[in-house]
Amino acid sequence: MRKTGILFGRLMRHILRSPDTIITVAMIPIAMLLLFVYVFGGAIKPSLGENVNYVSYMLPGVLLMAIAGGVSYTAFRIFQDAEKGIFQRFSSMPIPRASALWAHVLTSLVSNMLTLAVIIAVALVMGFRSSAGVLEWLAATGVLALFTLALTWVAVVPGITAKTMEGASAFSYPLMFLPFISSAFVPTDTMPAAVRWFAERQPVTSIVNTVRALLNNQAVGGEIWAALAWCVGIGAVFCVLAMRAYKKRGSA
């Protein structure tokens, strides 16, 4: 844990010296928030009901988009370390293999939480309001953190195995597109049957519905268990794959 903390501090110093990374990650989600609320919101809101605050409705999906974009920088940083031979040097030192990767994962978690805070601040200016209490906010933050960890482990794999810088971060584009085929921006019952079938069974929908219900202080139901299962399952699978890829890269 001590060595992971040292490596984590190294990565966080890089981010704090260049906070433009956090702002850059937040720009596209904020642009989507502005576009959907002020351009498309008038057409979409009738399908939600007059009493629905569209900023509050779509905010969870925008937060997931920001996370998907943010973890691409994790892949980029890991690719840089791999190309510079830092992992090979670590393998010859008394540093546990997991420490280097966990440092990147924790850095991703902290930087993405800072990005989400910026987006929520903008949403508050735009009219976002939450009736959730402290426990509901903590639960929503926990789900978002768990989703960040899961996607970060996904990002670690291309970061280690990619041959080019572009290839290391390109994996995030499909992930950023997933919220569009979910309940993030419109109800799934307005979609064609085939699209609706996929939207209701992909992980983003259950996570969006869970976070939305928590922030609106509504009953979560079984959605939270599906959301947690997706996050834990994805994170566990890609954690194993990442460790194997790192071991292979370190011994190369």
Image: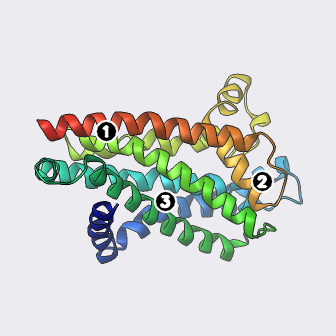
Give the image quarter of residue 224. Answer: top right
Residue occupying the point 80% across, 62% down? 53
Q: Position of residue 26 (x, y in %)?
A: 48, 64
Name which residue lies at 74% across and 41% down: 223
Q: Which dot, 3 or 2, sits closer to the camera?
A: 2
Q: Residue at x 26, y 45 (%)?
A: 166
Q: Nearer the viewer, residue 160 or 99?
A: 99
Disc 3 residue type? Ile
- How far is mark 1 from mark 3, CA to CA? 31 Å
**Residue where numbered disc 1 is placed:** 243
Q: Residues within 10 Å of mark 2 (few under 14, many from 20)?
A: many
Instruction: Check residue 213 in the rendering and tell me which mark sits there, or answer none.
Output: 2
Question: Which numbered circle lies on residue 220?
Answer: none
Give the residue number, with chain letter if any, for mark 3.
28
Quarter of the image where the C terminus is located: top left
Q: CA distance from mark 2 to mark 1?
A: 35 Å
Q: Earlier in the sequence, mark 3 or mark 2?
A: 3
